[in-house]
Image (cartoon, helix red, strand yellow):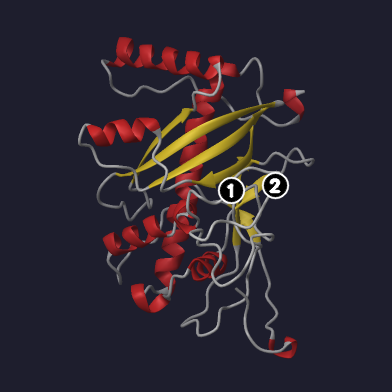
Amino acid sequence: MGASGSSQSTPVVTETVKPVETSEPVKTLLQTDPNRVKEAAKNFTPGNMYSSECPMTKGESPAPPSGCPMHAGQGDNSDINPDNMMPPPNQRPAPDQPFSLSTDREKSTIPKFSEKEEEKWVYPSPQMFWNAMLRKGWRWKDDDLTRSDMDFIIKIHNTNNEDAWQEVLKWEALHAKECSYPRLKRFGGKANDLSPRARFRCWLGYEKPFDRHDWIVDRCGKEVRYIIDYYDGGDIDTKTGRFTLLDVRPAFDSPSAVWDRMKVAYWRWRFAGGQVTEVPKIEQKTAESSS
């Protein structure tokens, strides 16, 4: 969704990309309710922005089904990026936006599969998040969020992704000899499509995840799909922005993934009495060291 009016009134937008601050504490929330921001953050996840009916994979990209919220009054999804299921970056303030938002973007630590082997994924700015939610059909009057709320939501989003990538690297450590430089190739939100494990947990009476992502990781030429279920872990930590419990594992798409899951399940049973134990960690190396 772009700003209305003639080209003469279109504001000039500057964009800054900076490294993600994974260790920097989030500002303590003194003027807002942390739990209200947490609920807003859960609704602002990309998986909730675009329903599971939206296409994720590359290749054919027909018009999405009528239930796909990316419509927002438009007739096709030809401008949707199939790598992350997001519309093109829109840094212009929306009509009737109640306050200005930052257009600064943070560069993640997550390697991006591209011709530039050292390239990293870049997180959306608060303004991009706002515009994406408007495209979905969300309106500010319904939530009454503040500028500081949006900054906090962005921090939660970025922290969740950084934590998820670290969990992926633990699994990839099992294949460190095969590939020391895995890279994230593409991803998509599937919030309305429960994974088999999440569905089984629901049958047992446990809470269902509030979001799900499928990440496609390039393991030096081999595509590996990871399923990430996001669970509400309770009160939000206003120092770190963390409240999410992540369940990250490779999908049962290959004998190798099945074997990895079996090994880790055994380790958890053998050494931790069923409690979660960390898979040996892979040190993220440079692209040159993987050749």
- Hey, which quadrant is residue 43 in on the image? bottom left
Task: Please tell me whether mark 2 sits on a helix, a strand or a loop.
Answer: loop
Is 110 left, or right, of 227 in this rendering?
right
Instruction: Identify which residue is drawn at 52% across, 61% down.
Output: 66
Residue 145 sits above or below residue 273 on the image: below
Instruction: Identify which residue is drawn at 47% across, 51% down.
Output: 47
Q: Where residue 103 sits: x, y (%)? A: 60, 69
Is 185 left, or right, of 215 in this rendering?
right
Task: Please tell me whether mark 1 sits on a helix, a strand or a loop.
Answer: loop
Disc 2 vs disc 1: Cβ atoms closer than 8 Å? yes
Q: Where residue 186 sits: x, y (%)? A: 62, 42
> Residue beneath label 1, please?
55
Q: Where residue 60 sits: x, y (%)? A: 70, 47
Judge by depth and name the residue closer to the eye, 110 or 186.
186
Residue type highlighted by circle 2: Glu
Instruction: Identify which residue is drawn at 68% across, 75% down.
Output: 13
Residue type highlighted by circle 1: Pro
